[in-house]
Amino acid sequence: MNPDWKNFLLSKNATFNNDTDIVFSSPEHEGKKHIYPITHLGVLTIAGIDAAKFLQGQITCNINDITDIKSSLGALCNPKGRAITTFLLVKNADSFLMILPKELLASIKKRLQMYVLRSKVTLTDSSDQLSLIGLYDKASQAAEETELRFATSNRGNIVVNLQERRLIIAETDNAQALWDEKDKLGFQAEGSAQWRYLDIISGIPWLSAETSEEFIPQMLNLDKLGGISFNKGCYTGQEIVARTHYLGKAKREMFLAECDVSATPEANSTIIDDSADTEQSVGKVLCAQNAHNSCKMLVVLQISDANAYNLKLKNQNQDKITLLTV
């Protein structure tokens, strides 16, 4: 993490459990305006005159659909069509910013570098140069929801619309100025865990080291989120992704769920259905986050079992899971 950004957040009474888990000692959490430091995600910059052509051969979304006013979710897959990482791809002048889990960034950069060859492309970890901030303003929520999801603007800072929220990408000095400005406008600082919680209930499928290369993109609902193009041509893993689409054989999908647990379930935890005596394994936890005395999670389940009434975590207590989307 950029030390200036960290020191700035410390001056705002942030407490760092680690560089990706930040909390604030706010006495109340009932305000209508919130601002979040997003430090669990990093920024990989892909630049050079061949950047667009290079990315087109590597990712699930269509690079030609990504403009200065439109960003997109997407995935980078292995040859078997399994998503190594999901990301938000943002165009920034002649380069592209790939927003992805920070724990996967170094391995993704190394993997992409293998395919650069003679292409005029540079890959740069820009996580220390660019800071990520989340904003939520309930008063302007209705107006923001009329915008297309992932609509993007750039007036000094890059702003990506997440309908009920906004993601800001800013150089560190600009990020500090923005934070101070929003502070004066009554925005309340909230911890990074709360932003992860909001990503989960919004259905954004971030991967981790435990879930990388476990699922094809359709299992993560990336087709429903506009993160897969089926007419863009070849990319790594495209044959499997396209075959799944045209043959209609995706056997698993992602669902929003909740669970009453004291400890947040680990990514890739097994989910069972004990409606039969066999306690059959029917899915996995993609990600989970506790907030407001509730644990929300994204789970990947066999489609035929999505309506099962007895979904439980395969743990000591066999904690009950309730689906919130079916």
Image: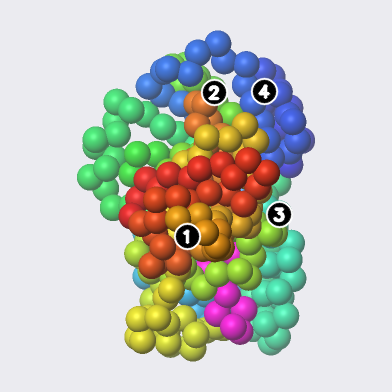
Q: Is residue 146 above or below residue 185?
A: below
> Residue 84's quadrant in the figure?
bottom right
Percent of width and height locating residue 218: 44, 70
Q: Report, in whole angstroms, how far the alpha carbon at label 2 lies from the one at label 4.
A: 9 Å
Point out which mark residue 49 bears.
none
The CA span between labels 3 and 4 is 22 Å
Does residue 27 show up? Answer: yes
Q: Amino acid at mark 2?
A: Ala
**What's the mark number on residue 189?**
2
| Label 2: few (<14), some (14–19) or many (≥20) C-alpha neighbours in 10 Å | many
Residue occupying image coordinates x 35% and y 50% = 325
Element marked by disc 1: loop
Left-right relation of 77 to 146:
right
Find residue 55 and report its image quarter: bottom right
Q: Residue furthest top?
A: 27
Residue in the picture at 61% in, 84% down: 79
Query: Where is mark 1, residue-wise?
Result: 276
- Looking at the image, which is closer to me, 207 or 279? 279
| Colour basis | rainbow
Q: CA distance from mark 4 to mark 1?
A: 48 Å
